Image: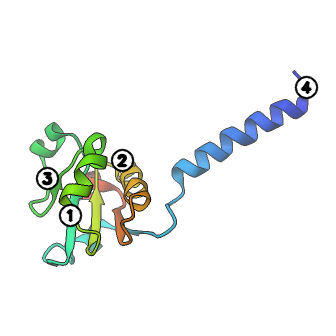
Amino acid sequence: MPTWLNIVIIALIVLFLVKRIMPVKGVKSISTTDLKGLLKDVNKQFIDVRTPGEFKAKHIREFQNMPLNTLGQQAQQVLSKDKEVIVICQSGMRSSQASKLLKKMGFEKVTNVRGGMSAWL
């Protein structure tokens, strides 16, 4: 295989990984410490995108469970595009994916919780 082809393949792999890790444009990121100060704000919507089993085992009372695999259908019916949506998962990876999806669906104010439930004390 030619060297230039190897370089192109490596570059594509790196680009793919960087796109998965980098925050989405227009999505805010907050810590769990920051989240604690927002939980009583009625102008925010709190979504937990973990599985129902994970949610049942441990969750934050203000969050509504909306698993990532059903978010596309549920978001349009349940969430208001006029209010900020704060998204959490176990580690921050699924909530990052959910944030991207919500932005694509037209939600303007989306915030991802860094570290997810793993960082919640």
Disc 3 versus disc 1: nearer the observer: 1
**Callout 4 amino acid:** Pro
Q: Is mark 3 on a helix, strand or loop?
A: loop
CA–CA distance between discs 2 and 3?
A: 15 Å
Disc 4 versus disc 3: nearer the observer: 4
**Location of residue 43 in the rendering, given as x and y in whole percent from the top left corner:** 19, 78
Query: From this viewpoint, is residue 30 visible?
Result: no
The C terminus, quarter of image:
bottom left
The N terminus, quarter of image:
top right
Q: Is mark 1 on a helix, strand or loop?
A: strand
Residue behind mark 4: 2
User: Is the residue marked by circle 1 packed among few (<14), some (14-19), or many (20+) residues within 10 Å?
Assistant: many
Residue 65: numbered disc: none
Residue drawn at (66%, 46%) of the image? 15
Camera-side residue of 104 and 24: 104
Camera-side residue of 63 and 118: 63
The mark that comes first in sequence, 2 or 1, is 1
Query: From this viewpoint, is residue 6 visible?
Result: yes
The mark that comes first in sequence, 1 or 4, is 4
**Location of residue 102 in the rendering, given as x and y in whole percent from the top left corner:** 37, 58
Residue behind mark 3: 59
CA–CA distance between discs 3 and 1?
A: 11 Å
Q: Do the residues labelled 4 and 2 touch (CB within 8 Å)?
A: no
CA–CA distance between discs 4 and 2?
A: 37 Å
Rendered image quadrant of residue 60: bottom left
Residue drawn at (49%, 61%) of the image? 24
Q: Is residue 22 above or below residue 68?
A: below
